[in-house]
Image (spheres, rainbow, N blue to C red):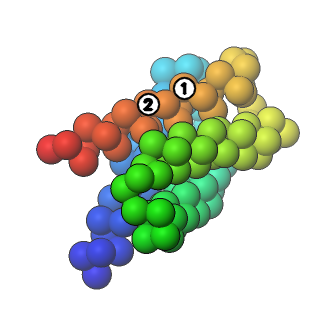
Amino acid sequence: MSKIMNSYLIPLFLTVIIEMAVAYLMGIRGRRNCFLILLVNIMTNVTINWLHGILFKWLGNSGTLLIYTAGELTVVLTEYCLYRKDLKADTAVWKYALLANTASVLGGIIWKSL
């Protein structure tokens, strides 16, 4: 259970909190938007953490920066595509996807360094 908590649940919880805060600060509000952000992050966060685990076993630490960079760029593009149609916001959706994921990655780095 501890591995599941550390690999999936804690990162997901932190990501949702951080990305909801970014949405709020960018004026993205409402139940429908919050629910969409939650669903999209459950999908992308669990998937990327699962892939990171597999790729780290295969490549080891030698590919850490490449794995994170490629993975996070893929997440930003995926989230943008998912939000583009359904996220109701006055701000550009690509800005939200980029800023929210950047904040989430930085939050994860800080969390792991504690």
Q: Is residue 35 visible?
A: no
Q: At numbered mark 1, what does the secondary structure look like: helix, strand or loop?
A: helix
Badge 2 crowding class, 10 Å Cα cut-off, few under 14, some 14 to 19, many 20 or more, is: some
Circle 2 — which element?
A: helix
Confirm whether residue 60 shows in the render.
yes
Task: From this view, report whether residue 10 is shown above or below residue 50.
Answer: above
Question: 67 or 3, which lies in front?
Answer: 67
Furthest-right residue in this view? 85
Circle number at residue 99: 1
Residue at the (54%, 26%) spot, across then down: 99
Q: Residue at x 40, y 43 (%)?
A: 17
Vertical side of 25 occupied by 3: above or below: below
- Under mark 2, the amino acid is Ala
Instruction: Look at 43% across and 71% down and name the residue there.
Output: 57
Point out which mark residue 12 bears: none
Q: Residue 28 sits in which quadrant?
A: top right
Q: Is disc 1 surrounded by few (<14), some (14 to 19) or many (20+) residues within 10 Å?
A: some
Marks 2 and 1 sit apart, C-alpha to C-alpha, by: 6 Å
Question: Residue 47, how many percent across, how many down?
Answer: 58, 63
For residue 35, above or below residue 60: above
Q: State which quadrant residue 85 falls in.
A: top right
Asked if the residues shown at circle 2 and circle 1 are in contact, with their CB atoms under 8 angstroms apart, the answer is yes
The x and y percentages for residue 20 are 49, 38
Q: Circle 2 sits on which residue?
A: 103
Residue 33: % across, % down: 65, 40
Q: Position of residue 54 (x, y in %)?
A: 50, 70
Q: Amino acid at mark 1?
A: Leu
